[in-house]
Image (cartoon, rainbow, N blue to C red):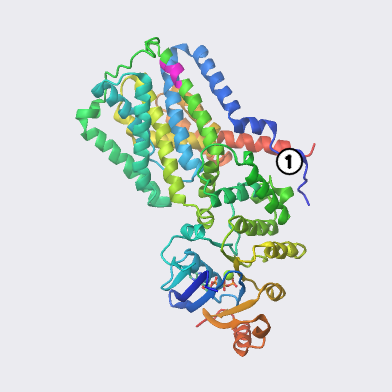
Amino acid sequence: MAVSMDQSLTAPSLVKRLADSGLIGVFAIVLAGAMGYLLMPNNLALLTQIVAVALLVLSIDLVTGYCGVATLGHAALFGAGAYGAGIAAVHFGITDPVAMTAVGLLAGALAGLVSGLVILRAHGLAQLVLSIAVIHLFHEAANKASGWTGGSDGLSAIMPNAFFGLFEFDLWGRTAYVYGVVLLGLVFILLQILVRSPFGMLARGVRQDQIRIAAMGASSHAVLLRMYVISGAVAGIGGALSAISTQVVGLDSLSFTLSAEALVMLVLGGTGSLYGAMIGTVVFMLFEDTLSAANPFHWLTVVGALLIAVVLFAPKGLYGTAVALADRFRRRPA
Amino acid sequence: MTPVFEVQNLNKKFGGLVVTNDVSLSMAPGDRLALIGPNGAGKTTFINLVTGNLAPDAGHVQLSGEDVTRMRPAQRVRRGLVRSFQVTRLFHDMTPEEHLALAILQREGRSGQMFGHYSGRVRVMDETAALLDQLGLFDLRHLKVREIAYGQQRLLEIAMAMALKPKVLLLDEPAAGVPQSETALVEAALDSLPSDLAILMIDHDMDLVFRFAKRVVVLAAGTVIFDGLPEDVTKDSRVREAYLGSYADAGSTA
Ligand SMILES: Nc1ncnc2c1ncn2[C@@H]1O[C@H](COP(=O)(O)OP(=O)(O)OP(=O)(O)O)[C@@H](O)[C@H]1O
Ligand SMILES: [Mg+2]
């Protein structure tokens, strides 16, 4: 038999255990965050936006990567969080950034519940179509309710208070950036706990075989709906962060384009792992920023070519492929 | 004894093909029943119908006196009706240990917990290890299911059903695909199950059937043609005819 019962094969490696516990991830987030701060001090607004979108991509990963739900409408959850935080600030005077984030979280979770109830009624292609319908409906609703949302002009004049009355949201976006990195780190830890939990295992099972899940006595639909709500909360935090840092919310935060781009980022990084989601976002958005500045006309072509290359040659995404290669290296007899 | 599992006048057609023809069957706690019949007789379909994986055209299914005909499969499982699959259905990216831990947590109503790793739960780990050991899977517990042999996947399929501690257990050809050297493991596992559990097993291996069953039901072309003691089944003329007939012109069903 080819399978040897060598310890290194059957027991998870130290690196894998550290990765599972999320320590590596938190360390990477803090390190990348600090590097960004030092290397791109004039571009903190971009970096903060990357953090916000990373939360959206993580949120898609929860339903797509872990549970196997195909969606092109996930920006609905992000946009709900952004508008929730913005409307709370502009119309209700809730300008404390933490409170705004909490409103975004709740709005996102609610949007997750609503779109989950709609999208989960169907499967496969029909599911994808429903998700597109959902994002268009959310977009239209925000457009029509211009009294609340500012319509196509966007919701502006969002003025978050200083943090704990101490840290102003400065012109350079330092406060917002640090806040974003801290939020991402916290969300990452909680999600790492979630995906390792029994519920996380159940979710992976739902992706792989719903008939087996039912044969165990569990309800796929209940798992998926709960995950959609959690996913909405995460995307909502991302939306709120975006509203706090840019101080405007536009209809683009609730668009099909953002939904599709975020899905592309996830595929680029690799589905079904929190690391893949974050790596995909950072690579895609830095790439986009650099290329669109260098060549505003053809950067989309390059992004398209990059994506085709990834899908063809590294279908597990950047992170997934790296892990697979490392695994193969480790297993090769010395 | 009052039946724990009762099927009344179950019917199912696929297009024009009658696959389940007015099937009635009941089982008492502790029953050891073998459901046999030629290929295509409708044995797997019968299981799919009673577990809710397929909807019957007519008929009723009762579990401990409760009508479960309209319930979803998962609801029936929670009431103690558990099956295994003829063609293994497992999570290819998960390990045998994860499978069994998840099944045990699910049985205990704790599979929805959002924190902690199963390996931190001592009782779950002990029970998982015992099941793995019983089916000879302990050394493979950390490998992904897609990395283990099909025969071992078959054993895990059985362990999954056992982990749910059913009241009624329906096994669809549990030993098919298990290497000869390991069928003893399957039989020993079946022997170890609680004596008040009602078990229905489909199998084509007559030696296994005769060792296991205290009662045999024969299905041919969707119809129950025999329900009785194992020692009487080979003497029955309709049974002989069904098996001979199916070998003579395999595939043609009424
Ligand atoms: N979903 C389906 N749609 C149409 N026909 C089906 C379907 N499932 C099964 N059949 C047909 O119903 C008949 C009974 O199939 P079933 O799988 O129940 O037989 P079986 O007794 O389990 O056979 P085997 O011993 O080969 O497992 C077969 O003729 C099969 O082709
Ligand atoms: Mg069958």
Q: Foreground residue, A265 or A164? A: A164
Q: State yes or no: Cβ of the residue under disc 1 lies below 8 Å from any atom of ligand 2.
A: no
Q: Position of residue B226 (x, y in %)?
A: 58, 83
Which chain letter matches label 1?
A
Residue most toward the bottom?
B237
Give the answer, above or below, for where A294 lies relative to A217: above
Give the answer, above or below, for where A125 lies relative to A265: below
Residue type (three-letter) at the residue carrying disc 1: Leu
Element under disc 1: helix
Residue shown at the point (29%, 19%) measured from the top left:
A158
User: Mark 1 sits on what residue?
Assistant: A9
Q: Foreground residue, B81 or A96? A: B81
Residue most toward the left?
A147
Q: Position of residue A125 (x, y in %)?
A: 41, 51
What segment is highlighted magenta in the picture? A176-180
Counting labels gives 1
Residue shown at the point (69%, 59%) measured from the top left:
B151
Magenta span main SS: helix
Query: Is residue A145 found left or right of B123 in the rendered image?
Result: left
Is residue A139 magenta-colored? no
Residue shown at the point (46%, 66%) measured from the top left:
B54
Residue shown at the point (55%, 50%) measured from the top left:
B108
